[in-house]
């Protein structure tokens, strides 16, 4: 958290410039993936994520992720996901059109 009116002190961190990491986590399910672009052409580019609704048990689309993976992690994930491809969405809710384009 940064106090907007605080001074910057080179080489040291003042109490007004403290970093607090995000520590909330959530278990998610990979419900789809899209191919990569540019340097990731031919590789997995991003994964569509879902979470189960506590009341109904439905798998709901909650977002996607495409960064933070090593090249090897993408290769490993692709090898596990390819055999799981299906013709229909596993999500009970609709995935936004801009996120659903080109998804497996």
Image (cartoon, grey):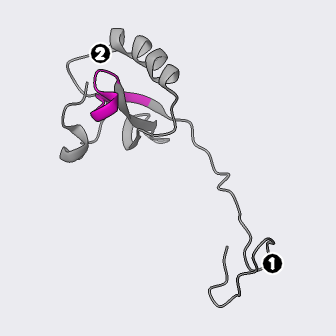
- The answer for how far apart the CA atoms under marks 1 and 2 are is 50 Å
Residue at 41% x, 38% y: name it: 66
Q: Is residue 49 rendered magenta in the image?
A: no
In this view, the residue in front, 90 or 45, is 45
Which quadrant: the N terminus? bottom right
Observer-side mark, 1 or 2, equals: 1
Q: Which residues are magenta?
A: 30-43
Residue 85's tag is 2
Mark with earlier residue (1, 2): 1
Which quadrant: the C terminus? top left
Q: Is residue 24 left or right of residue 89?
A: right
* Label 2 crowd bin: few (<14), some (14–19), many (20+), radius 10 Å: few
Residue at 46% x, 36% y: name it: 52
In this view, the residue in front, 93 or 41, is 41
| Residue 15: % across, % down | 80, 78
| Residue 86: % across, % down | 26, 16
Local SS, label 1: loop
| Up/down of 18 relative to 75, above or below | below
Q: Is residue 35 rendered magenta in the image?
A: yes
Q: Is residue 51 left or right of residue 6?
A: left
**Where is mark 1, residue-wise?**
15
Q: Is residue 93 left or right of residue 59?
A: left
Q: Residue furthest top?
A: 83
Residue at 36% x, 25% y: name it: 44
Residue at 30% x, 30% y: name it: 36
Residues at circles 1 and 2 in contact by the CB criterion of under 8 Å? no
Q: In which quarter of the view is residue 32 placed?
A: top left
């Amino acid at each position: 958290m940064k106090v907007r009116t605080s001074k910057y002190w080179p080489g040291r961190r003042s109490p007004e410039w403290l970093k607090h990491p995000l520590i909330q986590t959530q278990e998610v399910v990979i419900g789809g993936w899209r191919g990569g672009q540019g340097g990731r052409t031919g590789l997995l580019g991003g994964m569509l994520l879902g979470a189960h609704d506590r009341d109904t048990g439905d798998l709901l689309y909650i977002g996607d992720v495409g960064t933070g993976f090593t090249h090897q992690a993408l290769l490993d994930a692709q090898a596990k996901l390819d055999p799981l491809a299906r013709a229909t969405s596993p999500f009970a809710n609709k995935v936004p059109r801009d996120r659903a384009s080109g998804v497996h």
